[in-house]
Image (cartoon, rainbow, N blue to C red):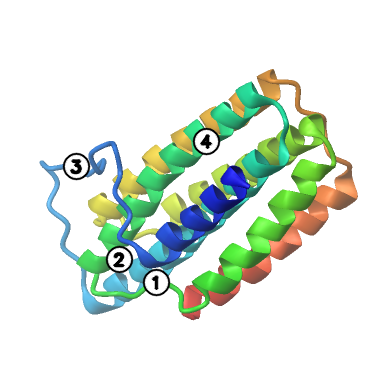
Amino acid sequence: MDRFLGACDQALRTLFAKPRGTRACPVVPAEATHLGAQERSHAAALMRVNHVGEICAQALYTAQALATRDDALRASMERAAREETDHLAWTQARLDELGARPSVLNPLWYAGAFAIGLVAGRLGDRVSLGFIVETERQVEAHLQGHLDRLPAGDHASRAIVAQMKADEAAHADQAQAAGAVNLPAPVKAAMRAAAKVMTTTAHYI
């Protein structure tokens, strides 16, 4: 019951409270960011997608931590979730700087990701870890795509995305080392398809 109430508290804080990171936002102070109106709009859409990704990350890690009976694994997932909170804070701050709003569908994204994470967790710890590995690998590739698409002069957004990409790779490596199984190809394809729906929708809404 305590863990369930903690999960509810985490959902409320993720969706309705201002996120507070434990690490400073990785901007490049020596590089001023100057964007035209079209570049600003494009960067804002990409950062909104990244913000949704971090909403989903909170939901996934919270659900998987709730599902496991392994205290050490739960602690590892909670540490990863705290790092993802940094990402949530950074992307929210960057959206504010760009004068843009987060996705209005964030509660829906959170609920869906939580349900998926709970199912993955109930299938066993090794499957749950495999789900983390595949999720983080797909996110890593997604963030590389954003680095390729962000305006070259948007040093602030690019610095944030680059650090997020490094953190996601580390989370995948940690889950792999902890005993993750390799998920079947159809499951990976379904995960990519679901992510595509989310990223395409969040780009605009």
Report, in whole angstroms, how far the alpha carbon at label 4 lies from the one at label 1. Answer: 24 Å
Rate crowding at label 1 as few (under 14), some (14 to 19) or many (20 or more) other CA atoms within 10 Å: many
Considering the numbered disc 2 on the image, is that residue within a helix, a strand or a loop?
Answer: helix
Rate crowding at label 4 as few (under 14), some (14 to 19) or many (20 or more) other CA atoms within 10 Å: some
Name the image quarter holding residue 95. Answer: bottom left
Q: Along the line of sight, which residue is nearer the eye, 187 or 28?
A: 187
Residue underneath mark 4: 78
The kind of residue on which mark 3 rests is Val
Report, in whole angstroms, how far the alpha carbon at label 3 lies from the one at label 4. Answer: 29 Å
The kind of residue on which mark 1 rests is Pro
Viewer-nearest of labels 2 and 4? 4
Residue 149, given in percent of the width and then of the height, sits at 44, 59
Say left or right for 70 vs 173.
right
Instruction: Indicate whether 109 appears above or below 178.
Output: below
Rate crowding at label 2 as few (under 14), some (14 to 19) or many (20 or more) other CA atoms within 10 Å: many
Viewer-nearest of labels 3 and 4? 4
N-term-proximal mark, 3 vs 1: 3
Residue underneath mark 1: 102
Residue 31, given in percent of the width and then of the height, sits at 14, 46
Give me the residue at 49% from left, 41% from top. 81
Report, in whole angstroms, how far the alpha carbon at label 2 lies from the one at label 3. Answer: 17 Å
Q: Along the line of sight, which residue is nearer the eye, 151 or 40?
A: 40
The kind of residue on which mark 4 rests is Glu
Report whether residue 57 is seen.
no
Cβ–Cβ under 8 Å for marks 2 and 3: no
Give me the residue at 55% from left, 43% from top. 140
Name the image quarter holding residue 82. Answer: top left
Considering the numbered disc 3 on the image, is that residue within a helix, a strand or a loop?
Answer: loop
Q: In the rendered structure, find residue 95 and report the number of the disc placed on it.
A: 2
Residue underneath mark 3: 28
